[in-house]
Image (cartoon, rainbow, N blue to C red):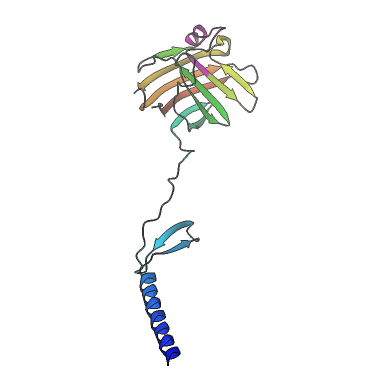
Amino acid sequence: MKPMIIGTILTTISGIILAVFTQWYSTQPIISTDTSQGSQSTKQSNNTVLPSYEAPKQNTNQVVGTLQVNINGTNKTYTTTLPFDNKISTNGEWSVLFDNRDSIYIILPSDVKAGHEFSAEDGALSTSSWGPPSFGFVYKDKSSNSSSLISDTNSFDSFGLIIDKWEGRGGYAEGRFSAEIRPLIGDTIIMKNGSFKIQIRN
């Protein structure tokens, strides 16, 4: 009789343990991975989906500036993903590079304000043998691999640039320009109705 009693007791205890474990297990969340969406979500037994975490996406190719100009009768648009910046300059000059196969590089003095006007002579006077210019305009024609620097007055028959808006750090800059360039290689380049709008580094 004793073996039968012991067996009955063990069976009863096993049943209790199984029932408790089953009840506990039913209350635990189930982790599932949805590979079709490339993200992980946590689901509870009542089919409630908890919020899933996704790392924020950074747009490293966002256009922050646009320059438009007519070059020898052809309208061209240049863009940049970098704002006007003075962190890399020696004396606080602001600079930006617009690119569209060929490129236009603009340097403005650290104290630039709305209403400032610049000419080819300003570029020549601001250039020295010991440091970078406080104002500059560079046009690089990639088709002929030729660069024209505003500091070289022999390259520019005429040039003018006006700053219409300068909102300072975190704001926007807008301006207009025109030029007639005689590059070292190739024909004369005539720029008309040039304008730009670009963010300024915060």
In the image, is residue 186 part of the stretch drawn in magenta?
no
For the C terminus, the quadrant is top left
- Examine the rendered structure and indicate whether residue 31 appears above or below residue 83: below
Can see residue 72? no
Q: How many marks?
A: 0
Residue found at x 42% / y 84%: 11
Residue nearest the viewer, comparing 63 with 122: 63
Decide if residue 11 is on the left or right side of residue 132: left
Residue nearest the viewer, comparing 77 with 125: 125
Q: Residue furthest bottom?
A: 1
Residue found at x 53% / y 24%: 104
Residue found at x 54% / y 10%: 131
Across and down, in percent, residue 142 comes to 62, 27
- Examine the rendered structure and indicate whether residue 146 appears above or below residue 18: above
Across and down, in percent, residue 123 comes to 50, 11
> Which quarter of the figure has residue 50?
bottom left
Residue nearest the viewer, comparing 55 with 197: 55
Residue nearest the viewer, comparing 136 with 72: 136
- The segment highlighted magenta reads 121-137
- Examine the rendered structure and indicate whether residue 98 appears above or below residue 134: below
Can see residue 13? yes
Across and down, in percent, residue 197 comes to 41, 28
For the N terminus, the quadrant is bottom left
Across and down, in percent, residue 135 comes to 47, 14
In the image, is residue 128 part of the stretch drawn in magenta?
yes
Residue found at x 37% / y 79%: 16
> Which quarter of the figure has residue 108?
top left
